[in-house]
Image (spheres, rainbow, N blue to C red):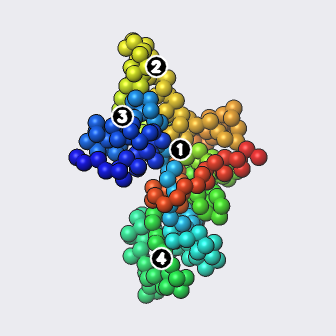
Amino acid sequence: MAITAAMVKELREKTGAGMLDCKKALVETDGDMNAAVDFLREKGIAKAAAKGDRIAAEGLTAVAVDGNKAALVEINSETDFVAKNERFQTLVQNIADAVLRNGSETAEAALASEYEAGKTIDTYISEEASTIGEKISLRRVALFTKADDAVFGSYLHMGGRIGSVVVIEGTTDETVAKDVSMHIAAARPLYVDRTSVTEEEKAREEKVLTEQALNEGKPANIVEKMIVGRMNKFFEEICLVDQTFVKDPDFKVGKYVESKGGKVVSFVRFEVGEGMEKREENFAEEVMNQLKK
């Protein structure tokens, strides 16, 4: 496969590695971008690109809650100027309310569902986009349900640039749930716990860590023991219950929730435009700083 300058540039942006190293990695992996990232990590040249670091598309997230049901949505606009517009903000909340009301589990289903009599959400967005003068799109939705002895925690950072919702069972303490939802916004967990991590992802990380250790010249018997520790650190980075609680570093999140009589059931975190390559901002770091005040 021909390796283009654009491919080298993309890999360099993902890993921070030098141009020549990136080109070599792409050649060695026949242009497979993910494999090239792993190749560089195995050689100790780059770290894993954090999911969600690449931020693009403007817009907002919004949360709607009604009893034992909740919804989280992300609506994109073209510019930050429009995202700060009161009409756009109203539209985002209206769509969150409609998604919750209709029980739409995907963006596609939500767009086709009723906003009001004789009008779908898709039509409502189109009409508002014409008035606002900018393309507006519903990117994704998430629905949540809970039992009577559980609680929702939600948090919107910067008015909705990051939105998170968590479900905690065994307690109805909204303060606990709110604090955990703020932690989620700041710390970017990917899974609730280790059992949620796919076997494929575990195997991939273990392979990378093993190659790193071997390339460091460690003997095979030592490598095996090292991998256990490094995998534990990996889980602590991506699993919510294993993360150090931002608001109280003496606790892991899971232990903190347990101390309040609860257990984390599920969560979702949306960051506006993540994965859509346009510009980069570290909103999560802002949340982290706010929590530590």
Of tags 4 and 2, which is closer to the observer? 4
Tag 2: residue type?
Met
| Residue type for callout 4 | Lys
Q: Label 2: which residue?
A: 226
Residue in view at x 43 percent, y 45 percent: 12
Q: Position of residue 265 (x, y in %)?
A: 52, 46
Relative to 278, residue 285 above or below: above
Q: Which mark is residue 135?
A: 4
Residue furthest right in the image: 293
| Front disc: 1 or 2 | 2
Of the numbered discs in the image, which one, if any, rests on residue 189? 1
For the residues marked 4 and 2, what is the alpha-carbon distance in whole angstroms? 51 Å
Label 3 sits on residue: 39
- 1 or 2: tag closer to the N-terminus: 1
- Please give the name of the residue rendered at 63% of the width and 72% of the height, measured from the top-left corner: 84
Which is nearer the N-term, disc 4 or disc 3?
Answer: 3
Q: Is residue 145 visible?
A: no
Gap between marks 4 and 3 measured at Cα:
39 Å
Q: Is residue 212 above or below residue 103?
A: above
* Front residue of this view, candidates 137 and 183: 137
Q: Position of residue 257 (x, y in %)?
A: 63, 40
